[in-house]
Image (spheres, rainbow, N blue to C red):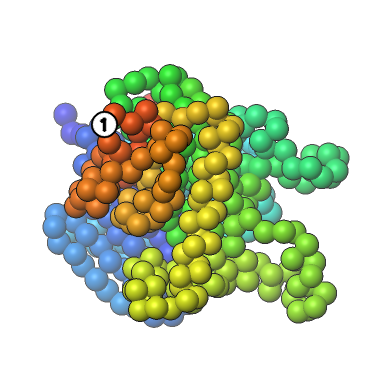
Amino acid sequence: MEPIRVLVVNSGSSSIKYQLLEPDSGTIIASGLVERIGEGGGAIEHTADDRTLTEHRDIPDHTAGLRLAFAKFAETGHDLTTAGITAVGHRVVHGGEVFYRPTLIDDAVLNTVRELSTLAPLHNPANVRGIMAVRELLPDTPQVAVFDTAFFHGLPAAAKTYAIDSKIAETHGIRRYGFHGTSHEYVSGRAAELLGRPPETLNQIVFHLGNGASVSALSGGRPVDTSMGLTPLEGLVMGTRSGDLDPGIILHLMRTAHLDVDGIDRLLNRGSGLRGMAGVNDFRELRHRIDAGDTAARAAYDVYVHRLRHYLGAYLIDLGGVDAVTFTAGVGENNPDVRADALAGLHRFGIVVDPELNTAKARGPRRISPPQCPVQVLVIPTNEELAIARAAVTVTEKGQ
């Protein structure tokens, strides 16, 4: 019997990340990245069977980008049009109040995702373009949307509610939705497996630290709070996003710097965070500058860590104690300094990082706290693609 295969697509405004994988085993057959779509000077990097193909060419739109990816699949012996793919799973950023579980995509679902673009103007339109492109290239293959916000749909009212006029909030869908939900759900489940305990018995704090960053508090396997809100802009300091901000700053900039809505959007989403403070958002370059004595880089790093500790403290109180603190995503998995500094001096709370375990060269799930500590500190690689693929198979099998 041929193994089930699923194509996972993560469509951004000017890029498409993709993987072809077997959900049962987690085996990645092929993966790739199409970049600079519609910008000129486009490129694709496609890896399959330990072979990487790279091509540079203009890519006018997402359909052209996926056509190029499909050509690379065929060139490496994995023609998607004849591969018998069970489903295509799409990462869709915002599900609003409507979508809180993986959903089979039809015209009505697609239209609703498009309408929800008012809540995620940088993300949902790109997700729609990816879905439309796959529909054109694989018209008979079921497509499933897996929503970043779904895991946090059931946040307690006190955690999801903003203190503004309730009628305005209801009319315009203003609440805290949370993001990176697929990652938080996957990683917290893997943490429970690593500890050999049912998720229902654990209090966990999960830090998803990539260029985008978020943290969640989970009790009994369910989230009780998370740092991102109506949009992915709220919360931790990120690569190019400000995170938490006094709303009065926006009004001040409108009055004094004469920034319009688009200008403020660009500033807070693309020109803030580490890049805004230090000029770079790559942690390797940030560390290089710190070591070279760059005071702006040092200050940016300190602000970044301060915000991590701020949320850690809040969530320790929210949960009334914690069994595990887990780090994931690019920075969380690969930067021992961030992990050590975020948890420094917390031994009175039962949280200790073992220096040797923390700096050991390792890639898989692992514990970095001493064995006798009451709170386990873990590093667990996230795998959103695998989670999306498994969700897609479940939905198509049920015909939902």
Rendered position, 156 above or below 83:
above
Where residue 296 appears, x then y in whole percent? 50, 75
Rendered position, 365 above or below 202:
below
Q: Determine the residue positioned at 43% across, 19% down.
A: 201
Where residue 71 appears, x then y in whole percent? 27, 62
Front-most of 290 and 215?
290
As drawn, is 388 to the left or to the right of 279? left
Where residue 383 appears, x then y in whole percent? 34, 44
In which quadrant of the rendered view does residue 189 lie?
top left
Front-most of 15 and 226?
226
As drawn, is 259 to the left or to the right of 270? right
Front-most of 189 and 202?
202
Front-most of 210 and 143?
210
Residue 194 shows up from this direction: yes
As drawn, is 341 to the left or to the right of 106? left
Mark 1, residue position: 371
Badge 1 element:
loop
Q: Determine the residue positioned at 51% across, 48% down.
A: 309
Label 1 amino acid? Pro
Q: Quadrant of the N terminus?
A: top left
* Number of marks in picture: 1
Instruction: Rate crowding at label 1 as few (under 14), some (14 to 19) or many (20 or more) other CA atoms within 10 Å.
Output: few
Rendered position, 246 above or below 373:
below
Where residue 377 appears, x then y in whole percent? 35, 38
Q: Residue furthest left?
A: 50
Residue 37 shows up from this direction: no
Q: Determine the residue positioned at 48% across, 22% down.
A: 220
Q: Determine the residue positioned at 27% across, 49% down.
A: 355
